[in-house]
Amino acid sequence: MRLFSSRKAQLEQKARELEEREARLIQREQALEQQSVQSEEGASPPPSGPRNAKERFYDKIPVTVHQLDIFIGICIAAFVLVVLIGAIQGQG
């Protein structure tokens, strides 16, 4: 009987510790939420538009990533073709 009462006391102690931890976590979450709200209110807006000449130039060219992939593939194929033609003419 004594074993069960000591075990019950240990469980009650653990339950109190967990409740205290939970209360501290709730307080911490509330403090973090308040900080995030304050930082959002005081945050400066992100820069609007490109920051340098290169980005402004790229914004003027309406090209998708797929189109760039095709262009790069054509350039690689042309380079390989030029190297092969040079190798064939160099042998003859």
Image: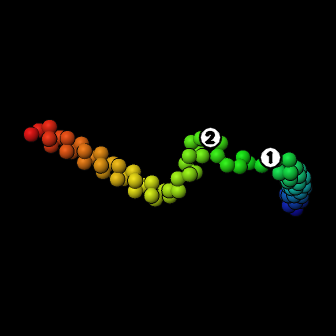
Q: Residue furthest top?
A: 90
Q: Quadrant of the C terminus?
A: top left
Residue at (40% x, 53% y) in the render: 71
Residue 58 x/y as whole percent? 55, 48
Location of residue 7 by image quarter: bottom right
Residue 12 x/y as whole percent? 89, 58
Left or right side of 46 for 29: right
Residue 33 x/y as whole percent? 85, 53
Q: In terms of sequence position, does the residue under pointer 1 or pointer 2 come before the other?
A: 1
Label 1 to label 2: alpha-carbon separation: 20 Å
Q: Amino acid at mark 2?
A: Asn
Q: Which element is circle 2 on?
A: loop
Q: Which element is circle 1 on?
A: loop
Query: Which numbered disc covers residue 44?
Result: 1
Mark 1 against mark 2, which lies toward the viewer? 2
Residue at (24% x, 42% y) in the render: 83
Q: Amino acid at mark 1?
A: Ser
Residue at (14% x, 37% y) in the render: 90
**What is the basis of the colouring in this image?**
rainbow
- The crowd level at tag 1 (other Cα within 10 Å; few <14, some 14-19, many 20+) is few
- Relative to the observer, which residue lies in front, 43 or 11? 43
Q: Quadrant of the N terminus?
A: bottom right
Is residue 65 among what the camera can see? Answer: yes
Query: Which numbered disc covers residue 52?
Result: 2
Residue at (56% x, 51% y) in the render: 60
- Relative to the observer, which residue lies in front, 8 or 73? 73
- The crowd level at tag 2 (other Cα within 10 Å; few <14, some 14-19, many 20+) is few
Is residue 14 among what the camera can see? Answer: no
**Number of numbered discs visible in the structure rendering:** 2
